[in-house]
Amino acid sequence: MRILFLCNANMCRSPLAEGLLKLIFKNRNIDAFVDSAGFEAYYINESPEDHVIRKAMDKGVDISTKRVRLFTQSDFDKFDKIYVMDTLAYRNAIEFARDDLDRTKVDFLMNVINPGKNEPIPNPHAQNNDAYDQTFELLHKACERIADTLKEEQLN
């Protein structure tokens, strides 16, 4: 399984989700590839936000070596599932889609928790610590659910 997380800048939510899922997969011995990307060229090759790196490290997730990268159309060929953080990322990903197969790979990450609702993961950028904690908890819950589902599929 190859999973990609997308948000607008790849500076906060998507690298955090990537780091979380990688750690969960490692702890559960799940063989899968995880990455994240964004749509803002401004931040290419930069690290995620310092505040996000520190918050992640406080929770045992090291994303300090992550570098921002752009989503490309070829990502549809490289990944089985593409999870977006919000409506903007969804629209952008769908705009890149070449066909129905590409479009079926894209889904809101929150649909893992609340199926069919297309809810966003709140963007904590420039907000207080509580906002970062809330976002972390939602990402953690969704990543745990992805791991549970994948583990069940691997057992069957």
Image: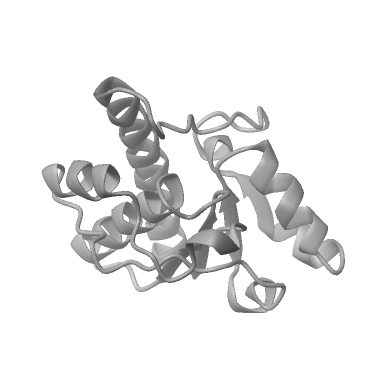
Q: Residue at x 80, y 64 (%)?
A: 97
Q: Quadrant of residue 152?
A: bottom left
Residue 29: percent from the left, percent from the top?
A: 24, 68
Where is 48 relative to 156, above or below?
A: above
Q: Quadrant of residue 124?
A: top left
Q: Quadrant of residue 125?
A: top left
The residue closer to the viewer here, 72 or 102, is 72
In the rendered structure, the answer to whether residue 105 lies left or right of residue 84 reads: right
The number of numbered discs placed on residues in the rendered structure image is 0
The residue closer to the viewer here, 28 or 57, is 57
Residue 122: percent from the left, percent from the top?
A: 48, 29
Q: Residue at x 58, y 36 (%)?
A: 111
The residue closer to the viewer here, 4 or 37, is 37
Q: Residue at x 36, y 25 (%)?
A: 127
Residue 52: percent from the left, percent from the top?
A: 28, 45
Where is 129 relative to 78, above or below?
A: above
Q: Residue at x 58, y 71 (%)?
A: 79
